Image (spheres, rainbow, N blue to C red):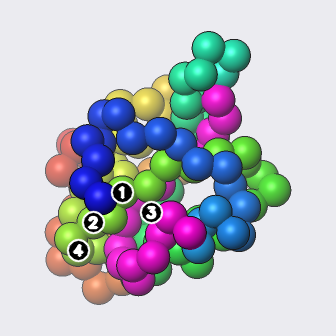
């Protein structure tokens, strides 16, 4: 099933729901947060996995209520997307306090840092 990214809804953050939604072993990005009273997904944390999005997201169960996720074609594209979100939203609005780390052995840097 193909969904438009902008309209993709968030999912409740439980083991069962993560297994149901994230069926591919893949690099990817995720956002964690909650749903506001008017049904909007409010992001509190951005993260990524270079290898296995499913198991990475499970580390955050009980810390956050809902998640969204996006598969990435490579660790590099996941890293670049995470950096983009970090630079766009990090100024006090989300829980991420430190810059995303590069994937192991990466020969590239964040394109948004100067
Ligand atoms: Zn950066």
The residue carrying pointer 2 sits among few (fewer than 14), some (14 to 19) or many (20 or more) residues within 10 Å by Cα, namely many
Residue in view at x 72 percent, y 45 percent: 65
Residues at marks 2 and 4, CA–CA distance in whole angstroms: 5 Å
Residue on which the image places disc 3 = 48
Measured as percent of width and height from the top left, residue 89 is found at 44, 31
| Residue contact at pointers 3 and 2, CB within 8 angstroms | yes
Q: Badge 1 local density, few (<14 within 10 Å), some, or many (20+)? A: some
Would you say 12 lies left or right of 1 here? right
Nearer to us in this view, 82 or 110: 82
Q: Is residue 8 magenta?
A: no
Q: Which of pointers 3 and 2 indicates the residue nearer the eye? A: 2
Q: Which residues are magenta?
A: 20-35
Estimate how packed mark 3 is, as few (under 14), some (14 to 19) or many (20 or more) residues with alpha carbons within 10 Å. Answer: many
Asked whether disc 2 touches disc 4, contact meaning CB atoms under 8 Å apart, the reply is: yes
Distance from disc 3 to disc 2, alpha carbons, whole Å, reads 9 Å
Q: Nearer the viewer, residue 55 or 94?
A: 55
Q: Quadrant of the C terminus?
A: top left
Q: What count of labels does the image hold? A: 4
Q: Is the residue 81 above or below the residue 104 in the image?
A: above
Q: Badges 1 and 2: C-beta atoms under 8 Å apart? A: yes
Q: Earlier in the sequence, mark 3 or mark 2?
A: 3
Q: Is residue 50 left or right of residue 46?
A: left
The residue positioned 56% from the left and 69% from the top of the image is 20
Residue 70: numbered disc: 1
Q: Mark 1 and mark 3: span between their CA atoms? A: 9 Å
Circle 4 packing at 10 Å, graded few (<14), some (14-19), many (20+), is some
* Location of mark 4 (residue): 74
Give percent across and percent down for residue 1.
Answer: 29, 59
Beta carbon of the mark 4 residue lies under 8 A of ligand 1: no
């Amino acid at each position: 099933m193909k969904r438009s990214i902008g309209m993709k809804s968030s999912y409740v953050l439980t083991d069962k729901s993560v297994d149901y939604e994230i069926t591919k072993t893949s690099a990817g990005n995720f956002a964690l947060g909650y749903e506001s009273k008017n049904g909007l997904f409010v992001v509190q944390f951005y993260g990524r996995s270079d290898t296995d999005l499913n198991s990475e997201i499970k580390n955050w169960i009980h810390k956050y209520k809902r998640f969204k996720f996006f598969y990435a074609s490579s660790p590099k594209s996941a890293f670049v997307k995470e950096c983009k979100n970090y630079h766009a939203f990090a100024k006090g609005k989300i829980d991420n306090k430190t810059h995303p780390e590069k994937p192991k052995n990466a020969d590239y840097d964040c394109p948004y840092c100067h």
